[in-house]
Image (cartoon, rainbow, N blue to C red):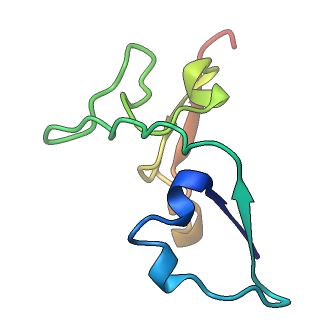
Amino acid sequence: MLQAQTETDLFSPRFYPTRQPDTDKLRTGELAGTAPPKSPLIEVTDKKVARNDGNAKGGIRTPLVDFPLATLSGEPGGATSAICSLFGFTKPFTGA
């Protein structure tokens, strides 16, 4: 397993005291610079707050969310098996 920490995280109060030595199964690498900015939490009221395209507001932004071709959801989408319900659903936009 490769674990990466930035210079500002490496000596943070939470990481340093619990750091494990490198082994053949764990390596910690230090990246120059500071940690990326924190992403906003997914906005929720009694349910998730969606943008016009049906995707949630906030959270980690990926190209599939910032430039969507479909509505992505972590909610079960009528899956017939229990394992499939764990992955949510994707509903393509019409004409995409």
Q: Nearer the viewer, residue 73 or 61?
A: 61
Which residue appears farthest toward the left when viewing the image?
A: 46
Q: Residue at x 61, y 32 (%)?
A: 62
Horizontal side of 9 relative to 67 (left or right) equals left
In terms of depth relative to the viewer, which is nearer, 14 or 93?
14
Residue at 70% over, 47% down: 32
**Frontmost residue, 42 versus 33:** 33
- Residue 76 placed where, x, y %? 44, 53
Q: Nearer the viewer, residue 26 or 51?
A: 26
Identified at 71% across, 60% down, the residue is 30
Side (left or right) of 44 relative to 57: left
- Quarter of the picture holding the C terminus: top right
In the picture shown, does residue 6 fall above or below 25? above
The residue at 57%/21% (across/down) is 66
Total labels: the figure holds 0
Q: Is residue 80 visible?
A: no
Q: Position of residue 83 (x, y in %)?
A: 58, 70
Relative to 44, 79 lies left or right: right
**Res. 79 in view:** yes
Q: Position of residue 80 (x, y in %)?
A: 54, 61
Q: Position of residue 65 (x, y in %)?
A: 56, 28
Q: Is residue 7 above or below residue 92?
A: below
